[in-house]
Amino acid sequence: TSGAYSPDGTTILTTSRDNTARIWDATTGQALHTLTGHIDWVAFGAYSPDGTTILTTSWDNTARIWDATTGQTLHTLTGHTNPVTSGAYSPDGTTILTTSRDNTARIWDATTG
């Protein structure tokens, strides 16, 4: 599991072994969105540099890109053959790196998946 602040500090992202990630108001602690779609625990999460999208990685062998405002899935990144354990946005937010227990790393287009 993991946690991350949005770039502007107004929201917090947490990941969980209940197969979800959640977006929280950083001031009030109120849950704003529950990100559902992964079918195994969510290992890691990160905001894009501009804060508009979120990356999650999961033990279901996928990563997902989410809309940070609505909580809706934008893209599911498939191709790893074992759990996806971590990920990162490039500094300019145009690409995403994922790493997996299949001993590979992959680079994805952050806009199209």
Image (tube, rainbow, N blue to C red):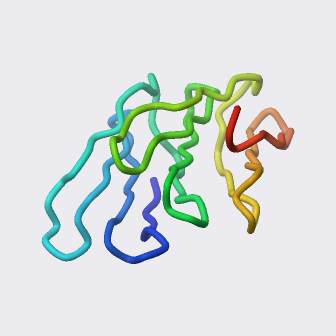
Residue beneath the point at 64% across and 45% down:
85
Quadrant location of residue 59?
A: top right
Left or right relative to 104: residue 3? left
- Residue 40, how many percent across, how many down? 46, 28
Left or right relative to 33: residue 53? right
- Residue 45, how many percent across, how many down? 51, 53
Residue beneath the point at 26% across and 59% down:
24
Residue beneath the point at 50% across and 62% down:
51
Front-most of residues 51 and 45: 51
- Residue 94, how many percent across, how many down? 75, 53
Residue 65 against residue 27 in the figure, above or below: above
Quadrant location of residue 3?
A: bottom left
- Residue 15, how many percent across, how many down? 41, 50
Left or right relative to 97: residue 13? left
Q: Split into 4 quadrants, where in the image is the C terminus?
A: top right
Residue beneath the point at 46% across and 31% down:
73
Quadrant location of residue 23?
A: bottom left
- Label count reads 0
Left or right relative to 88: residue 67? left
Front-most of residues 59 and 70: 70
